[in-house]
Image (cartoon, grey):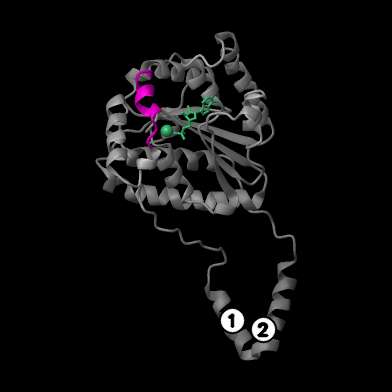
Amino acid sequence: MSYSNEFRVKSGTKLNLAKIDPNYHGGFENEESVVDELTKYSQRLEELQAVMYAENKHALLVVLQAMDGGGKDGTIYHVMSAMNPQGCNVVSFKVPTTEELAHDFLWRIHKQIPRKGQITVFNRSHYEDVLVVRVHNLVPEDVWSKRYNEINAFEHALTNAGITIIKFFLHIDKDEQLRRFRDRLNDSGKQWKISESDYGEREYWDDYQQAYMDALSKCSFNYSPWYIIPANHKWFRNLAVSQILVETLEGLKMKYPEPSVDLEAIRKLYHAEVMETSGMEAVELMKAVENQEPKQSKKKSKKKKKK
Ligand code: AMP
Ligand code: MG
């Protein structure tokens, strides 16, 4: 099953989030039944990121949006823990500062776009400027309503510059949000996330859903797709996000660059060095071992804790 096809928002289609089941979990029964698949995707993600970093040709921007409690932090934890910190980073967008508000809304975003070889995950993004800003009338309608086109032009320019963009909306329902608020209250490790606005914002649930439907349908294209991920089940959410990421990265057909040196010449230098330090016997032993080992480096993947 390819979740890319299943969950991709088709460009220009009218969306009805109420008709998309946030409890959906594919053909899987429960958390245990996805462990093997998840491990496979995590390992593949680790390999693909290593090639992306080495090749230094592509960049990946992952945008995460959700209602409060939708699971952005958990998704980031899951996805990023498969990666080498050297090649990736996370940027969280909060209420804009005075300095940020004194610029156009894309100013703070553009500064955080990944450079070649890097993966950046946005925890909230420029879409807040057509979501919270619209729901709370933080700017007049004639300002926010132009932003869909501005976002599309911006993202198009980024993809022309070699950046792959992929956007996930983690879709939960109102009951699940309340369950997660309860978990936050009862878990001392999560209490720090509680915000006074959480319950106030719930009152605007329908307005947010409407704003999401507009943003997702107006701003999803082949070059910069939105995916709606059924996210009431965290394990299914992680599975779907991982699979789509793997598929997207595989589509880039990346490969390790050719070595810039003459490997045979370097190998001779190395053997000479070993002989000088440890003698001929060590070189023979080493050659025998080299002949037995597979030539390709195999990285062991870390076994992850689930979140
Ligand atoms: P959190 O992600 O829970 O730390 O909260 C960040 C808060 O910043 C959320 O309430 C967002 O709605 C808010 N926020 C992010 N971007 C913007 C923006 N462009 N304008 C206004 N509020 C924003
Ligand atoms: Mg919050």
Residue 285 lies within the magenta run: no
Q: Nearer the viewer, residue 274 or 213?
A: 213
Judged left or right of residue 70, residue 283 is right
Callout 1 environment at 10 Å: few (<14), some (14 to 19), or many (20+)? Answer: some
At horizontal 36% and vertical 19% (from top left) the residue drawn is 205
Name above or below for residue 52 compared with residue 244: below
Label 2 CB-ligand 1 distance < 8 A: no
In which image quadrant can residue 197 be found?
A: top left
Which corner quadrant of the image does residue 267 belong to?
A: bottom right
Quadrant for residue 172, please give it.
Answer: top left
Q: Residues within 10 Å of mark 2 (few under 14, many from 20)?
A: some
* Residue at numbered disc 1: 286
**Magenta segment boundaries in residue numbering:** 194-204
Q: Which quadrant: the N terminus?
A: top left
Alpha carbon separation for disc pair 1 and 2: 9 Å
Residue 217 spot, x, y in % from top left? 49, 18
- Find disc 2 in the rendering and name its residue: 274
Q: Secondary structure at mark 2?
A: helix
Observer-side mark, 1 or 2, equals 2
The reply to whether discs 1 and 2 touch (Cβ–Cβ < 8 Å) is yes
In the rendered image, residue 15, in percent from the top left (x then y), is placed at: 42, 16
Label 1 C-beta lies within 8 Å of the nearest ligand 1 atom? no
Observer able to see residue 26: no
